[in-house]
Image (cartoon, grey):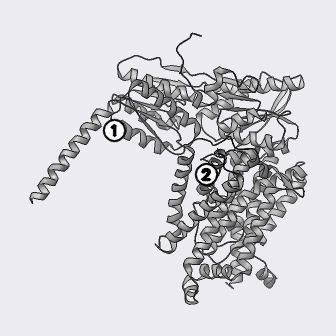
Amino acid sequence: MRSLLQRLPVETYVIGFTLVLWVILSIFTKGFLTGDNIANIMRQTSIAAIIATGVLCTIIIAGIDLSVGSVVAFCGVLFAQLCSHGLDLPWAVLLTLAGGLAIGTINALAIGRLRIPAFIVTLAGLQVYRGLALLVSGGMTVGGLPPNVKDFARGATLGLPNLFWAMVVVGIVVHYLLSYTRRGRYMYALGSNAEAARRQGINPIAITVLAYVLSSGLATLAGILMVSRLSIASPSMANAYELQAIAAAVVGGASLFGGRGTVLGAIAGAILFTTMSNGAVLLDVDPFWEMVIEGLLIALVVYLDNLQKQRQTGN
Amino acid sequence: MRVSKLLAAVSFAAIGMASAMGAATAEDTVAVIVKATTSEYWQWVFKGAEAAGKELGVKIDQLGTPKDDAAGQISVLESAAGSKPAAIVISPTIFEALGDPIAAVTDAGIPVIVIDSGAKTDKYASFLTTNNEAGGKAAADAIAQCLKDRTGKAAGKVGYLTAMAGHESLDSRDKGFLDGMKAYPDITVVGNRVANNEEAEGMSLTADMMTKDSDLVGLFADNAQMGTGAGASISEKGAGDKFCLVAFDSDKGEVEHLNDGSIYALVIQDPYMMGYAGVWYGYAAAHGARLPKNVDTGVGVVTKANMNDPKFAGLLDVTKRQMSPFTGG
């Protein structure tokens, strides 16, 4: 039994919880197990899951990215402005993504070269990019986008929502990078023990840049997808999404001390949160109680996960 | 030594000039303090205020906190009052919290014009606001009208979407909506969800509410963020011709959904007028005019059928706003 528990992957608890919740909701509500609702959950999860996947990369190297919510808003507004000024869709997407990559590079260099703590750099970013979102939009909702902008988020491929496929592709790519490439292993190594990693000849700045570029880049992608979904961009959107993303990664088994966490876990964490809010509506749970219950569930899942971690380290 | 004396003299002169300039401009300044500078609604208030400022030849200080933040707004109010402007126009974030600070500013001899939402004090020069309860009731009537138009009778299940909990103006809208629905015994209000004032969350909640009650026929969204989110959800489903969605306010997202048929009607307020008249009133009060204590800036109900009516043009798109001379009525 003990050896079995030790071999359980980190995302066991979050997946277990989500499955239990699905079974309960399927039994007690008539709307949950319907094609429409499953498609809703897929669409609602994917943007949060993509942001969580990015933030996970910074958590693995023992960093954090608090700026992602503001980056979603800034890049979303930037993308909408480019589109509404007549730039072709592919160019608007590429330019916006380039902006997101630049933000990640700036964050990483401030952390790696200037040695400012990641918490502070990205806390500053949270303010700066929200401010830039307001400047670029003049404080107003950006609308009047060409119809092809919303085609992607509204559409489906092989019967499943495009947003869901976007999450799957992002998940597979980042999972491959983390698990099957040297750079991915370096990220875990840097997060577990920065000094040891440096002695092994790992360039910490290059790895930091990779992690923060992934985080900002995926937040930028999420911003573009959100604009496609809402068919507008608002400078106030994605408020506090950084906290949701961190919660999803942590519930999915990531450790805020670094060196631990998986893409599957972060995505499962995002699915768990979406399921909870979906379930709260279907079961007609009071919205205020919903917040309390969600918070308690986060604490419970992380507690169980910690118990397992202790078993693994033999305490 | 000589250098430092010279420096001191220069800096004294600079301070003197700055304070003289400050004093000269402050008298011709009206400070406009909104609830949240990040929202389009409040930008419209600023636009109206700027227009009035231009006509009166006064400088407008656009102030406020980025997001609803009562403590932050009190600090902004206090520092604005410290610079002795001719008048202050403010929309209190929280009714209870802003009462005493506003009274203190009035006591200090600066006229305060309260706009949009009330504060717990009667020490202000004038209060310009939308009657939010009347707006909520108008939304209830619009949903009933929509159901009657499409099904022949005002009947079925409806829900409502609240942007944030514990906000005086939103609570009044919801109360007005629920009271208004009492006039339609065949309509039952089945659900209420509270979003985080976030379009995407409003969108998800709308879809989830329609899953919970598959026979839901109508929804009231009580502000612009909720209206945009709910509209996007109905538009995604392509359910605009079957579903009666009515929302408060008129930002770009909502107007687009009104246009594509996802939103049946918008209950619109006049934030531009609150800023515009607020500044005129403040200026008048500063020069001794006695003002009416309460002014209703009015609500209108816009549907796709009447959205091109010229009288709504400036209300739906602030850039088209033109102040016209008094015409009566």
**Residue B8 position in % (x across, y down):** 16, 52
Residue B38 lies left or right of residue B260; in this view the side is left
Of all chains, the one bearing label 1 is: B
- The outermost residue toward the bottom is A200
* Three-letter code, disc 1: Gly
Task: Give the Cα distance between marks 1 and 2.
Answer: 37 Å
Residue A19 lies left or right of residue A234; in this view the side is right
**Residue A66 position in % (x across, y down):** 57, 62
Q: Residue at the location (66% across, 66% down)? A: A54
* Picture quarter with the N terminus of chain A: bottom right
> What mark, if any, has residue A78 been given in the picture?
2
- Is A52 rendered above or below residue A313? above
**Residue A92 position in % (x across, y down):** 66, 54
Quadrant of residue B179 within the rendered picture: top right
Q: Of tags 1 and 2, which is closer to the observer?
A: 2
Residue assigned mark 1: B82
Q: Give the SS element for disc 2.
A: helix
Q: How crowded is mark 2: few (under 14 residues within 10 Å), some or many (20 or more)?
A: many
